[in-house]
Image: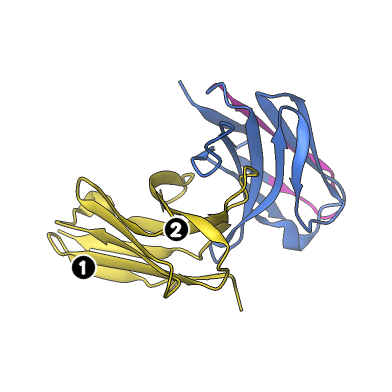
Chain colours: A blue, B yellow
Amino acid sequence: DTAVSQTPKYLVTQMGNDKSIKCEQNLGHDTMYWYKQDSKKFLKIMFSYNNKELIINETVPNRFSPKSPDKAHLNLHINSLELGDSAVYFCASSQSGFPYEQYFGPGTRLTVT
Amino acid sequence: QKEVEQDPGPLSVPEGAIVSLNCTYSNSAFQYFMWYRQYSRKGPELLMYTYSSGNKEDGRFTAQVDKSSKYISLFIRDSQPSDSATYLCAMSEKSNTGKLIFGQGTTLQVKP
């Protein structure tokens, strides 16, 4: 069973489109994260939710909007996609009290043309 | 200057070699120090974590933290081709937010 899953795995779209990435974890964790990994492999945190409450909101364009319907799911919606949004987006989860022990999903490779 | 600096490599070693991977940092508030391993086209996976200074050993892997020098290391003994991956150091302050600051990652290739 996959612990942290993301859909889709690959996403190719044109500039200006709106797209969503979904994430689900079956580890029973209460905290979930979105990270962006650029072409140079820099992994940077974007958002974090704890029990559906936004905890971390880094300096990210407001075209990016996370949504957590429940503590097992965290989705990322991106409006008006730009070329610079091309990257790999990772979802992760952890349990309160162990924030350093994060479990990552397989990533969604987003290409904006 | 980035908060966490890591030489991206690539680093190529023969099988059986001892590998040393390092990161430096500037934020003295960092208390948790992690090493993640990322295989090509996969998500990072936690290898080891250390709280504050000191050493930690897990099988062939040893993590060291020197807070006075703001320097952390990961040693891999008897390296194997299966160790070929990108190794990312990560750090966080003592809070429960889970905000990890990652280094760029060092790509390691272990040749048979």
Please provide percent x and percent y for residue B15: 14, 60
Protein chain holding label 2: B
* Residue B83 left/right relative to B17: right
Which residue occupies the extreme bottom position in the image? B1
Give x and y (percent) for residue A29. Answer: 58, 26
Q: Amino acid at mark 1?
A: Val
**Residue depicted at x 31% and y 70%:** B11
Q: x, y percentage for residue B111?
A: 19, 62
Identify the secondary structure beneath mark 2. strand
Task: Identify the residue shown where x is 52% and y is 37%.
Answer: A98
Q: On the image, numbered disc 1 is attached to which residue?
A: B13
Residue at 72% over, 36% down? A49
Front residue of B106 and B75: B75
Could you tell which of marks 1 and 2 lies nearer the N-terminus? Answer: 1
The overriding secondary structure of the stretch rendered in magenta is strand
Q: Nearer the viewer, residue A83 or A50?
A: A50
Q: For label 1, count other residues whose C-alpha is less than 10 Å away and answer few (under 14), some (14-19) or many (20+).
A: some
Q: Which residues are magenta?
A: A12-26
- Element type where label 1 sits in the image: strand
Where is A12 relative to B33, above or below?
above
Please name the residue shown 42% across and 73% down the image: B68
